[in-house]
Image (cartoon, rainbow, N blue to C red):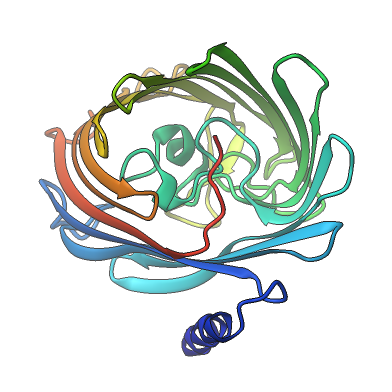
Amino acid sequence: MRAIIVAVVGLLGLSAVAQNKINPDISLNALFTLRGGTEGNKAQSEVQNGFALQEAELRLTSNIDVYFRGDIILAVENEKGQYSVAPEEAFVETLKLPSMTVRVGKFYPYWGRSNQWHTHAFPFIDALQTREAMFGEEGFNETGLAISYLFPTSWYFEGVLQFFSAENSAVFASPGKDDGATVYFLKNLWDLTDSSTVELDLGFGEGQDVQSMSNKIYNAALTYKSKLAGQRQLLGTIEYSSSDRRYFEDEDNPGTYLSQDKLSVASAWLQYEFIKRWWSQIKYEVVSHPESNTIEDVKISSLLFGFVPSEFSAIRLQYDWIDDPSKSDPEQRVALQLNVTMGAHPAHDY
């Protein structure tokens, strides 16, 4: 950990002294939270009460030459008071192939509406359940290859073919590096008017599990965006994910495997910039096990107000109501978050 911190300081110092294209663009993002909740003082709670560094992220990105671009993201995460540093993404992708991009390394696959977002880009303070309930706390983050192609159509139509080791413990949990998962992704974007768009994302994946059986995952997401009069904005998304799982690893007991036929997650959220720099947001999610008669649905409702003075900072206040039938009473949470970014950070996806 100390060696990593020294390396980070050295890189930041080098960037400040010599600003030229030999050095990569460097950015540092930090998320600070203050939380309070009815379950937050319990040792087994996923989210603890009090002040915390939710995450810090160091990103280095640059064109390697005219043919390749590189991106490395190191994340410092706080898990119940214990900090760890790990590469969140580290990949190289092509620049010169006509209508095509090839990406190799460790990265978030093209999947759904929210999987590729880093923590500071989440629409709400915590990850959406279409990502976390489906793929675990770290989301769908794998090592492999992605080939994307932009079709010559009148609208934006991109197709992505991806290959990974089937290691994600929540959906595949294959014990062998040679067992693979194939993931397909389609993105369509249409202009409705000069100030509004609609986007349709579709995904399908298949990979081997611990018993060498085939597990499958599915996703569909529909997003509407509109620029309104008076510098106002409206964004709305409906997303659905599901998985057909035969065997997968129990995240709480590594090495122990569970069997389950199906998991499905539905999420809908609306974001409205009612005054310039001021946002109000609502979200509703349902996590269900359609083929189980003993596991009841978990329902999550959220309300958020945010002040976003620029793309480099935001202050957000969020309330969550979590109705989990396995617990005696619904859980309530309140969180205040400061989100800041320093340095040259690449643009987020549209």
Does the image show residue 25?
Answer: yes
Q: Residue furthest top?
A: 192
> Which residue is at a point 72% across and 76% down the rendered structure image?
22
Q: Is residue 137 above or below residue 189?
A: below
> Which residue is at a point 28% across and 45% down the rendered structure image?
308
The C terminus: image quadrant? top right
Q: Is residue 79 above or below residue 13?
A: above
Q: Position of residue 91 (x, y in %)?
A: 71, 59
Q: Position of residue 345 (x, y in %)?
A: 52, 58
- Does residue 334 appear to the left or right of 102 in the view shown? left
- Does residue 165 appear to the left or right of 266 in the view shown? right
> Which residue is at a point 43% across and 46% down the rendered structure image?
121
Q: Position of residue 142 (x, y in %)?
A: 66, 51
Does the image show residue 300?
Answer: no
- Does residue 271 appear to the left or right of 331 in the view shown? right
- State the image quarter where residue 150 is shown: top right
Q: Residue furthest front?
A: 230
> Which residue is at a point 65% across and 42% down the rendered structure image?
109
Task: Report the label total.
Answer: 0
Q: Is residue 170 above or below residue 194?
A: below
241 and 112: which is toward the camera: 112
Q: Position of residue 136 (x, y in %)?
A: 48, 45
224 and 45: which is toward the camera: 224
